[in-house]
Amino acid sequence: MGLGSHPVRVLYTAAQIENRITFLSAEIARTIAPDTLVISLLRGSFIFTADLIRALHTQGIRPRVDFMSLSSYGAGTESSGTITVDRDLKVDVAGQDVLIVDDILETGRTLDFACSRARERGASVIRTAVLLDKPGKRAIHIQADFVGFTIPDHFVVGYGLDYGNYYRELPYIGALEMG
Ligand code: IMP
Ligand code: MG
């Protein structure tokens, strides 16, 4: 079976995701500075970031945005444990308040790596937001400040999340049925 042709069982519909992000953005806006620098971790968080920053705009936040592309997966469904920087930050984060945004927190290595890098570069306040949290797979002791949904140990796709770079376009989040 091709990587992109497995059945997907819907966990969160587009409407449920939108609703959760509306509430989450209000919670985040109460905490962060209005000119916070959003650091979006590519590639998985591009759709979440796009929706989150527009929801934050509605809450009066005027963020700047940068991207960092990190990989730990290769093409499979298990984290390799080593983080590779495919694209580094372009904005100088020294003295900045930053909000690091990722699609999903699993082992914690990716978010931990991104936080360390922001800290090394002198960010003054570092906060983290993830759409999904899979606490059952944690290898590093780290929690996100803001979490959309907490999920069991399923491999999930859609809404930016991929399997072998497929399924990112799905407007919903679903569990991949590997059979
Ligand atoms: P961590 O470093 O193990 O916390 O994994 C975080 C990264 O692995 C995320 O940024 C995702 O890109 C990817 N990832 C983890 N779990 C899943 C999943 O269930 N589906 C798709 N990608 C995942
Ligand atoms: Mg990712």
Image (spheres, grey):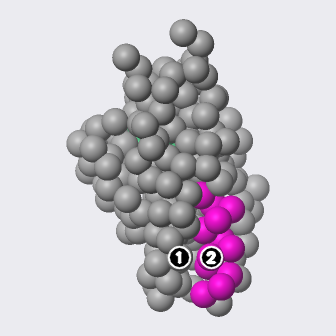
Q: Are marks 1 and 2 in contact (CB under 8 Å)?
A: yes
Q: Position of residue 37 (x, y in %)?
A: 65, 71
- The residue positioned 68% from the left and 62% from the top of the image is 50
Q: Position of residue 29 (x, y in %)?
A: 53, 84
Query: Alpha carbon of mark 1 to alpha carbon of mark 2: how far?
Result: 6 Å
From this view, report whether residue 85 is shown above or below residue 114.
Answer: above
- The residue positioned 60% from the left and 87% from the top of the image is 59
- The residue positioned 32% from the left and 55% from the top of the image is 150
Answer with the quarter of the image where residue 9 lies.
Answer: top left
Q: Tell me if mark 1 has few (under 14), some (14-19) or many (20+) residues whose alpha carbon lies within 10 angstroms of its own.
A: some
Identify the magenta region.
48-59
- Magenta stretch holds residue 55: yes
Q: Is residue 157 left or right of residue 134?
A: right
Residue 55 tag number: 2
Query: In what quadrant of the picture does the C terminus appear?
Result: top left
From this view, report whether residue 115 is shown above or below residue 43.
Answer: below
* Earlier sequence position, callout 1 versus callout 2: 1
Residue type at tag 1 = Thr
Query: Could you say whether the residue bearing mark 2 is in a helix, strand or loop?
Result: helix
- Residue that numbered label 1 is attached to: 22
Residue at the limit of the structure toward the top, as seen here? 1
Q: Is residue 158 left or right of residue 134?
A: right
Q: Is residue 16 left or right of residue 67?
A: left
Q: In front: 57, or 140?
A: 57
